[in-house]
Amino acid sequence: MARYRSYRDLDWPLLLITLVICGLGVLQIYSATRDTRWEDAWWKQLIWIGVALGLMWVVTSIDYHTLLGQIPLLYTLSVTALVGVLLAGRLVFGSRRWIKVLGVNLQVSEFVKLVIILVVARYVSELRSDEIKPRDLLKLGGLVGLPAMLVISQPDLGTGLTYLPILAVGILIAGVQWRYLAIVALVGTLTLPVGWYLLKDYQRQRLVTFLDPSGDPRGAGYQVIQSKIAVGDGGVWGRGVTRGTQTQLRFLPATHTDLIFSSFAEEHGFVGVVVVLSLYFLLLMQIVQNAQMAPDRAGMYVCMGVAALLLFHVLVNVGMVVGRMPVTGIPLPLMSSGGSNMFSVFMMLGLVNNVRLRRFVS
């Protein structure tokens, strides 16, 4: 009877929306990789989705209070794993981001996102005051900043930045005085020159090219220029599946990974874009609804951390393909090809369902 109730009380609309987005992603991966050396990417994506569903159920089944109780261990393992990747990870295109597990390349930084969500949720839910004090800001900043800096050192600036919205939504909901935020903003502004110095040459070039892509149309600005052409080429209804000129003639790079939204916009047009963005909006609203129904503050913070992270991913990726954000390599959740991000997103949605099921516990 308990098992039946668990199945019945899952957030089925959330799961349905998730699978529809995944289905559109698989369709676009098939179209974008047809007659290329990545033409098997679409069925690999189906395998990733199947495995991700299993991981989602595992995360849903373990009481999130148990996970919160193991935060010191999980955080230590996460930091250790990130250090291990820096020392012995696979070197691909000058970056060490992956380790091979059972023949599969996994990006550790993707799974650390779940730990960051739990770390922030536990810390802010245990605060005894109605607002965050400066020392709490420093502690939380250090807890999130350490793994973020390790990821940025790989180098992977995009994934490192995705940890920050989790921190931001936690402190904002917990309550923080605006003067403290102003001080943080001032310190961040003053340290920008140091951050610029620490960036790799190609990262600096991406930021410069973001301001003026036409300055290097065949180099760093190529992706942005071709992406904007592809999006505009889609018109209202799109050119149709496998009929996008920028996509099928290979002018557009990374059509099944970082720039999948560009190829989707070209082949499905403005109408298709509205449909996909509406699905993401509905997904986020389902997560927020679960946050509102959470049985405690920790559960609410867990759900809002997931929502903040997914929103950041979507905004940055979509902004990137239309030239409103720098190219950072942040994938589009549930659509971009790849196993690690798919696994982490489904596991985060498993956390949301986890909170939902425990709302019946008195």
Image (cartoon, rainbow, N blue to C red):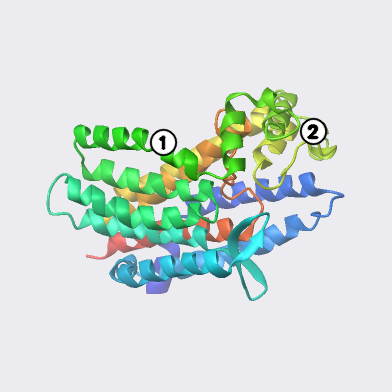
First-in-chain label (1 vs 2): 1
- x and y, in percent, of residue 245 in the image: 83, 32
- x and y, in percent, of residue 65 in the image: 29, 67
In the rendered view, tell whether residue 185 sits above or below residue 344. above
Q: Name the amino acid, label 2.
A: Gln
Residue ID for mark 2: 246
Q: Would you call the spot at circle 1 few (<14 residues within 10 Å), some (14-19), or many (20 or more)? A: few
- Is residue 343 visible in the rendered image? The answer is yes
Comparing 219 with 74, the one in front is 219
In the rendered view, tell whether residue 24 sits above or below residue 180. below
Report whether 230 appears left or right of 105. Answer: right
Q: Are marks 1 and 2 in contact (CB under 8 Å)?
A: no
In the rendered view, tell whether residue 293 sits above or below residue 278. below
Residue ID for mark 1: 192
Residue occupying the far right of the picture? 35
Which of the labelled discs sits on residue 131, or is there none?
A: none
In the rendered view, tell whether residue 221 sits above or below residue 285. above
- x and y, in percent, of residue 156 in the image: 54, 51
Comparing 263 with 182, the one in front is 182
